[in-house]
C-alpha cells in the first residue's frame, strides 16, 4: 500500500509524452537533473486542514535528461525495497520545470497513477492520485 503511494509519487513524475519548451528557452530552465532525496506522504485534499501523513522516510531519485523529456529512477524502502524508472514530460516555465504524467506501477503497487510536479534547481515537489490514493512528495538536492 505504501509502496504504491510512493510509486504514485514517482508517478507524479511519470509520463511518456515528449518534453516541450512552451514560451521559454531551454537556457532559462533550471537544471533539474541529478540526485534528489526526500519523503512522500498520503494526503486527502477533501480535508485540507489535516497535514499530509508521512508514508516512508526513504525516497531518493535520480533524474536524467532524455531527448524526449526526462527519466527519473525512484527507489527506497517502505516495508519492502522499491525501484521505479519513470518517463516524465517536462516543460520550462520561468525558473521552474513543470512535470506531468501517468504511470502504471502494476497491481501490487496500486495500478495507474496520474501526477503533476514542479522542480527548481533546489526543490522538486508533486501531487499524485489514482483510483484509491492521493498524496504529495517533497525532494531536495542530495
Image (cartoon, grey):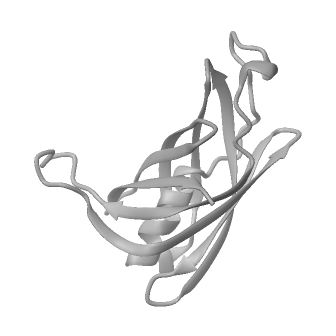
Res. 81 image quadrant = bottom right
Which one is nearer the viewer's eye here, 131 or 14?
14
Residue 110 seen by the camera = no
Q: Is residue 140 above or below residue 4?
A: above
Residue under the point 81% across and 21% down = 27
Q: Considering depth in this image, is 11 or 123 the residue closer to the camera?
A: 123
Residue 87 in picture, x, y percent from top left:
71, 52
Q: Position of residue 139 (x, y in %)?
A: 51, 54
Q: Residue at x 89, y 39 (%)?
A: 67
Q: Quadrant of the N terminus?
A: bottom left
Q: Is 6 left, or right, of 136 in this rendering?
A: right
The residue lying at 73 percent from left, 19 percent from top is: 28
Residue 71 appears at what percent x and percent y?
75, 53
Looking at this rendering, what residue extends furthest in the bottom direction?
A: 80
List the single residue furthest toward the right: 67
For the question of whether residue 90 can be seen, the reply is yes
Q: Considering only vertical position in the picture, is 130 above or below 55?
A: above
Residue 107: x percent and y percent? 50, 76
Question: How many numbered circles are shown?
Answer: 0
> Up-down: is 87 above or below 28?
below
Q: Residue at x 64, y 62 (%)?
A: 61
Question: Going by the image, does 75 lie left or right of 113?
Answer: right
Q: Quadrant of the C terminus?
A: bottom right
Q: Is residue 18 above or below residue 7?
A: above
94 with respect to 39 (left or right): right
Q: Name the image quarter holding residue 36.
A: bottom right
Q: Quadrant of residue 55?
A: bottom left
Q: Is residue 6 left or right of residue 100?
A: left
Amino acid at each position: 500500500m505504501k509502496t504504491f503511494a510512493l510509486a504514485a509519487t514517482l508517478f507524479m513524475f511519470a509520463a511518456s509524452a515528449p518534453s516541450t519548451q512552451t514560451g521559454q528557452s531551454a537556457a532559462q530552465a533550471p537544471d533539474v537533473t541529478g540526485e534528489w532525496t526526500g519523503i512522500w506522504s498520503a494526503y486527502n485534499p477533501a480535508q485540507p486542514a489535516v497535514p499530509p501523513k508521512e508514508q516512508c522516510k526513504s525516497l531518493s531519485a535520480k533524474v536524467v535528461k532524455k531527448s524526449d523529456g526526462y527519466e527519473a529512477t525512484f527507489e527506497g524502502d517502505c516495508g519492502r525495497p522499491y525501484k521505479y524508472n519513470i518517463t516524465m514530460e517536462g516543460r520550462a516555465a520561468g525558473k521552474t520545470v513543470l512535470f506531468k504524467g501517468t504511470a502504471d506501477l502494476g497491481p501490487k503497487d496500486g495500478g495507474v497513477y496520474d501526477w503533476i510536479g514542479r522542480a527548481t534547481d533546489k526543490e522538486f515537489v508533486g501531487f499524485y492520485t489514482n483510483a484509491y490514493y492521493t498524496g504529495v512528495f517533497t525532494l531536495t538536492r542530495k
